[in-house]
Image (cartoon, rainbow, N blue to C red):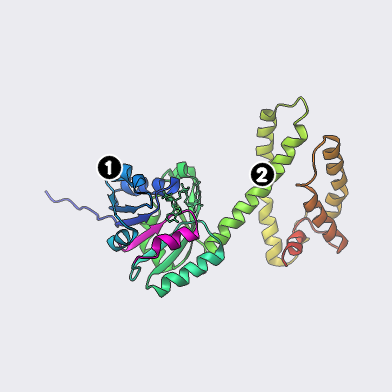
Amino acid sequence: MTQNVVEKTPVTLLGLGAMGTALARTWLAAGHPLTVWNRTPARAAPLAAEGAKAADSAAEAVAANALVVVCLLDDSSVQDALAGTDLAGRDLVNLTTGTPAQARDRAAWARERGARYLDGGIMAVPPMIGVEEAGGYVFYSGSRELLEEHRETLAVPAGTVYVGQDAGFAALHDVALLSAMYGMFAGAAHAFALIRKEDIDPTSLAPLLADWLVAMAPAVHRTADQLRSGDYTQGVVSSLTMQVAGAPGFLSTAEQQGVSPELLSPYFALMRRRLAEGGGEEDLTGVIDLLVR
Ligand code: NDP
């Protein structure tokens, strides 16, 4: 009897923190030969017991396989880890969170050393890794060829979303989404602060808040359409004039509830500025132009 065994791409992984360990386990479970290295060797022991090969040095790990994934704390730890390695002919995939500028510099640095480079921004937390229904994915930018060649392997831990040849774009998308998330958390913080001293159970507000944020989220599509067309009055349902008229009510409610307006005020200030510049027929898109320097 003959058996067709499909060889799985071998992977080298540098970095076995919370995220690196989660990534490692998915490749092992999917049958990919895996070589791992971590600065603190003890963290490799459980993975070695599960079938990974633990390299004694980063150089040895990089030499083991063409596909090298790094998931370290920050860009300077990537520099430290890769300093003594030979990257010639390697496909370097950097899943370490960093800035767009760091990614672009790292891409040039890798190219000078003869490696193809793909940068990644992970939109997931470790428990989502390898759990398809959790919806986690990684933004990738840089070498499209590298991604196409290794997409199947890279898709094992999480979905793959390619956002462009510019190596900095994955980090830029990552930061853009997380920045929006912080805006949402800031709004929720203000909402909870408003009811904090009242006889209102925060757990009864939470589902209302979550549903409202979900209902409002699609507004970003209208914003994008307006930015693309340049017509910020297109499809407006809540004019800036109306929204600025309502702003004092938000601020006086905060005052009455003994809540600092420091999260809300800067946004209202921008809305007022845009209104003063003649944006009354728009909704909130004009604020974006005030932010771009
Ligand atoms: P951890 O803090 O758990 O692990 C950090 C890793 O970096 C460890 O392997 C550590 O090695 C290594 N490291 C730190 N400094 C150096 C150095 N100078 N030289 C060599 N190795 C070093 O972080 P995570 O695994 O959680 O995160 C890894 C990356 O993934 C980060 O960039 C993070 O932003 C990103 N990420 C993490 C998410 C999360 O929820 N955890 C979510 C999305 C992205 P040692 O064991 O020796 O300390």
Give the crowd class for mark 2: few <14, some 14-19, many >=20 residues within 10 Å. few
Amino acid type shown at disc 2: Phe
Let me know if residue 155 appears in the view.
Answer: yes
The answer as to whether callout 2 falls within 8 Å of ligand 1 is: no
Residue shown at the point (70%, 32%) measured from the top left: 205
* x then y, percent, for residue 258: 82, 36
Q: Is residue 147 shown above or below 247?
A: below
Q: Which residue is mark 1?
A: 49
* x then y, percent, for residue 154: 39, 56
Q: Which residue is mark 2?
A: 185
Task: Please state which of residues 8 and 95 is positioned toward the viewer in this rendering.
Answer: 95
Residue shown at the point (85%, 56%) measured from the top left: 272
Q: Is residue 125 shown above or below 236?
A: above
* x then y, percent, for residue 264: 77, 47
Amino acid type shown at disc 1: Ala
Residue shown at the point (80%, 58%) measured from the top left: 282
Q: Which label lies toward us, 1 or 2? A: 1
Distance from the alpha carbon under mark 1 to that under mark 2: 41 Å
Task: Inspect the magenta stretch and tell me whether residue 84 lies in it.
Answer: yes
User: How many numbered circles does the render carry?
Assistant: 2
Residue shown at the point (44%, 64%) measured from the top left: 118
Q: Is residue 200 shown above or below 55?
A: above
Give the crowd class for mark 1: few <14, some 14-19, many >=20 residues within 10 Å. few
Query: What segment is highlighted magenta in the picture?
Result: 65-85
User: Seen in the image, is 291 located left or right of residue 89?
Assistant: right
Task: Inspect the magenta stretch and tell me whether residue 77 lies in it.
Answer: yes
Q: Secondary structure at mark 1?
A: helix
- Identify the residue at the far bottom of this view: 112
